Amino acid sequence: MCKICKIVHNVHPESFTLNIQLENLIENIEYLRMGDEYESAKERFEEFTTYFERLTEIRDDAELFVHEKISEIKLKVDLRREKLKTKIDEEALKLIDELNEYEKECREKINNLEKSKLESKLKQWEDDMESWSKQLACFHKDVDTWKKIDSECSSKLVGFSLV
């Protein structure tokens, strides 16, 4: 049987001798480098075979293909949603921190303003108390003067009798 054409030839073994080198070359031809064009064609053929097999699978089970594709898309959407949620949470926390800092600043300003108002009010009350104290001292002085005058008058009147 011929290894090339796969046909059985009736040849006397002595009249036909095998070329061992040629036979080895034929057996190992798939390992020989056939050039860039051959390699490129081989790669395209393998890609085509892969695509053809995938299309055959899709044709044979279209529902499974649709389910797989929709599941892939859902997974991508879910991953994107998680990334966005994480980003939103980070932004929200950042804003809350900024608001807390702003609230702290406002409280400090309010406290400073209230202290300032309180200090102003206390100063005013101290001034008022000092003024009232002076007036009270004058009043006491006047009362003492009036008591003295009253006492003097009373003692003079005791000597007068109304008959």
Image (tube, rainbow, N blue to C red):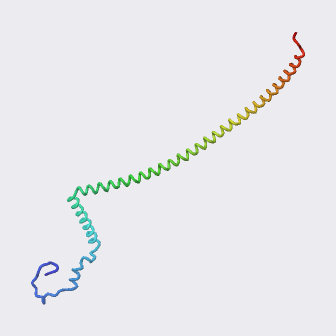
The percent coordinates of residue 59 (x first, y second) are 21, 58
Quadrant occupied by the C terminus: top right
Count of numbered circles in the view: 0
Asked if residue 55 lies left or right of residue 151, the reply is: left
Residue visible at 62% across and 41% down in the picture: 111
Asked if residue 38 lies left or right of residue 99, the reply is: left
Above or below, 109 relative to 90: above
Asked if residue 73 lies left or right of residue 26, the reply is: right
Quadrant occupied by the N terminus: bottom left
Q: Residue furthest bottom?
A: 14
Q: Nearer the viewer, residue 119 or 54?
A: 119
The percent coordinates of residue 73 (x first, y second) are 32, 54
Q: Nearer the viewer, residue 115 or 90?
A: 115
The percent coordinates of residue 148 (x first, y second) are 85, 23
Residue visible at 44% across and 52% down in the picture: 87
Residue visible at 25% across and 68% down in the picture: 46
Image quadrant in which you'd find residue 125: top right
Above or below, 99 relative to 70: above
Image quadrant in which you'd find residue 8: bottom left
Residue visible at 63% across and 42% down in the picture: 112
The percent coordinates of residue 160 (x first, y second) are 89, 14
Q: Nearer the viewer, residue 111 or 78?
A: 111
Q: Residue furthest right?
A: 159
Q: Residue furthest left?
A: 10
